[in-house]
Image (cartoon, grey):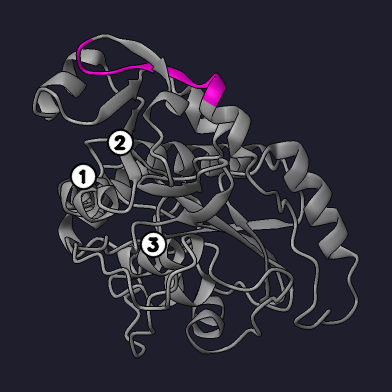
Amino acid sequence: MKRFLLPTVLTAILLPMVACGSRPSGTVPAPGGPVASFLKQNKLEARVVLIEFGTIGCELSNTGLDAMIDLQKRNAVPGLAFARLEPTADAKGFEDYYKEKSAPFPVVRDTRMEVANALGTTIYPQFALLDKFGRVRYRGAQPAEKDLAEWVKSLAAEAKDPGPDAPMFGSAKLDAAPLLVGTKLPDLSGAVKPLAAYKGKAGILLGFVDTRCPFSSVAIRSFPAVASVLQAKAIASLLVNIGEPEAAVKKAYAPGAAVVYDIGKQTQQCWNIQSVPTIVLLDSAGAVAYQGGAVWTEVAAATAKMLNLPPGSVTLEAQSTAGG
């Protein structure tokens, strides 16, 4: 019988929210603070660890959890340890859910997101791979088993801390311009058009969402206010609902809303959607100006930069997601 690891509630000082992808490329944060405490409390020090930031009730999060349980059961990647960070404030729901799951690795309630923020995993589900020295060496979607095996083998061979310039695995930039043309999805009326057909003169803001995750629901409610501001700057806005049945999508949105939907989740892979909500801002040529969580202050800053406007000249007064 697999043991259930009782919840560990972390109580360190809350760190500032860090958006996905906001750290400079090639700079790997030094271990310490909440991350060091987390590793020590869960006996993960000096080990290569794959950590998922996910939550109960999110389908993508639970898929990631099941995948990690399977990897651990099969010992598919020798030398790799696992852990899950869970932000839920519902202590009983947490205990009941994970007791039933019988996860054979630490599952930690990170209710104030101290560890998640320190790792840069501030939208869910998102994964971080830590080397033996506590540095994040990968941050993103659930990595493929083959990639994990190669990365862990490489990290196991490191004899000393590689420092802040340690290479990150799996870095890739989204090539969105051809995807705008090639991605064709139905809207609420059933009309199928490429995403490029919705683009405004100055660009387009895409919000990849579903209606089940609470963070995503917040982004959906915030989207009309954001779209109104951007429309005045010739930037169109469009929600892309992924992975839900047509009937559920049409029930969730008002008729005529700027929404297209992808039942089969094809967009999830080709657009590199690691989690929902994911916001992608593209300029008039289809180049990425922002990709990350629904952190509207950062989207506003990216919009101003994209349009060559003074810093602070674009304000998006909408609720950012707690996880993004």
Residue 7 rendering spot, x and y as whole percentages = 33, 67
Residue at the location (72% across, 76% down)? 46
For disc 2, the marked residue is 239
Please tell me the numbered disc located at residue 220.
Answer: 1
Q: Residue at x 38, y 75 (%)?
A: 17
Amino acid beneath label 3: Val
Q: Earlier in the sequence, mark 3 or mark 2?
A: 2
Q: Quadrant of the C terminus?
A: bottom left
Q: Callout 3: few (<14), some (14-19), or many (20+) C-alpha neighbours within 10 Å?
A: many
x then y, percent, for residue 72: 61, 45
Q: Which amino acid type is shown beneath numbered disc 1? A: Ile
- The segment highlighted magenta reads 181-189
User: For mark 3, what is the residue?
Assistant: 299
The verdict on residue 21 being magenta is: no
Instruction: Determine whether 14 is above or below 301 in the image.
Output: below
| Whether label 1 touches label 3, CB < 8 Å | no
